[in-house]
Image: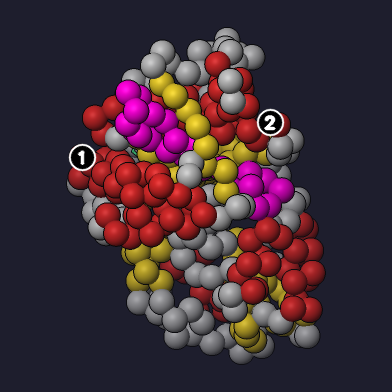
Amino acid sequence: MSALEALTSAPSRAGIELRPAGLTLRETVPSDITECGRILYEAFATLAAEHGFPADFPNVGVATGCMRGLVTNPGFYGVAAERNGRIIGSAFLDERSTIAAIGPVSVDPSAQDARVGRALMGALLARAETQRAPGVRLVQISYHNRSLSLYAKLGFDVRETFAAMYGEALHLELPGYEVRPARPEDEAACNALCLRIHGHDRAGEVRPALAKGKLRVVERLGRVTGYATGIGYFHHAVAETNDDLYALVGAASRIDRPGIVVPLSNGDLFRWCLAHGLRVFFVMNLMAIGIYQQPRGAYLASVGY
Ligand SMILES: CC(C)(COP(=O)(O)OP(=O)(O)OC[C@H]1O[C@@H](n2cnc3c(N)ncnc32)[C@H](O)[C@@H]1OP(=O)(O)O)[C@@H](O)C(=O)NCCC(=O)NCCS
């Protein structure tokens, strides 16, 4: 029995059966990329079409590229679900930083609503437990009643609501707020800022963004007062004030759909985005298990948290 099977074959502590009969769970391998990419595309496209939304992934090629990035990145732990030798779903745990993040989770539309998603989630939560993650989070599209219900049943609490917002580049400069590419010596200041605002850093995302030349900082009076690992769905930003965040978003060269993930409890930020022509794509919920501190500053979430 593999370690993963051992983790998920017994009922959970809450007495929940984690693995339905006939279902095999195993870690993802590169040869899964094509089929898991197809399922990722189909699962989200079918769901979006049911609700009259455009698909999250514009085509199966983009979804497969995303899947390749997940399966081949050692910072992510991937699980595939198989039945009768056929892959029917996959799910990923982002283990790069202190707080673990789940996503994407996708089950073949023909196999949905039969506890496969629950089994995949159980495997990831078991993994997070063995890795001693102090918290696990995810961001869920709010129109998906099934994922909302499943995650709540598994113990996740809704902590924030976001709007994914997209639009044309704003070409804004705020006097006194210098936005520039980060330098290696900025890394510590970025992590310290995140720690101060969220109670934990996201160093495992900051470092690769810096290495790829994507990390940007805003500097005010000679201090780093905000950073962004990029602008958009897969990136996060943290700042002392909304103005620092406006400088970072204002300097972005593009804000592609689905867009930046704006916490709706920050009404000033949401109204600023609206006033600058950004459009709401969809609304999402941040759901969390474990430690959660109300942020003490401004931020944009990523699709993870
Ligand atoms: C979300 C997803 C992964 C869930 O997997 P699944 O195999 O379909 O779901 P499961 O059968 O394991 O669990 C669904 C649970 O929600 C419950 N549920 C479904 N619709 C519900 C509703 N409208 N209200 C209340 N409960 C509901 C089911 O009864 C079930 O609970 P149970 O396990 O206690 O019986 C899958 O549906 C999917 O791929 N969706 C499209 C992609 C997506 O949105 N992924 C999630 C991104 S965060």
For the residue labelled by badge 2, is the local secondary structure a helix, a strand or a loop? Answer: helix
Q: Quadrant of residue 1?
A: top right
**Mark 1: few/some/many CA within 10 Å (<14, 14-19, 20+):** few
Residue 242 seen: no
Number of labelled discs? 2
Q: Position of residue 258 (x, y in %)?
A: 37, 60
Q: Residue at x 65, y 35 (%)?
A: 128
Q: Is residue 287 left or right of residue 97?
A: left
Identify the secondary structure beneath mark 1.
helix
Magenta region includes residue 80: yes
Q: Main secondary structure of the magenta part?
A: strand
Q: Which mark is residue 50?
A: 1
The answer to whether 37 is drawn above or below residue 172 in the figure is: above
Residue at image position (48%, 28%) is 25
Marks 1 and 2, the one that precedes in the sequence: 1
How many angstroms separate mark 1 from mark 2 (CA)? 35 Å
Magenta highlight range: 79-101
Ligand 1's image quarter is top left
Q: Is residue 137 visible?
A: yes
Residue ID for mark 2? 129
- Residue 79's spot in the image, x, y percent? 50, 37
> Callout 2, which amino acid?
Glu
Residue at image x 40%, y 44%?
Answer: 32
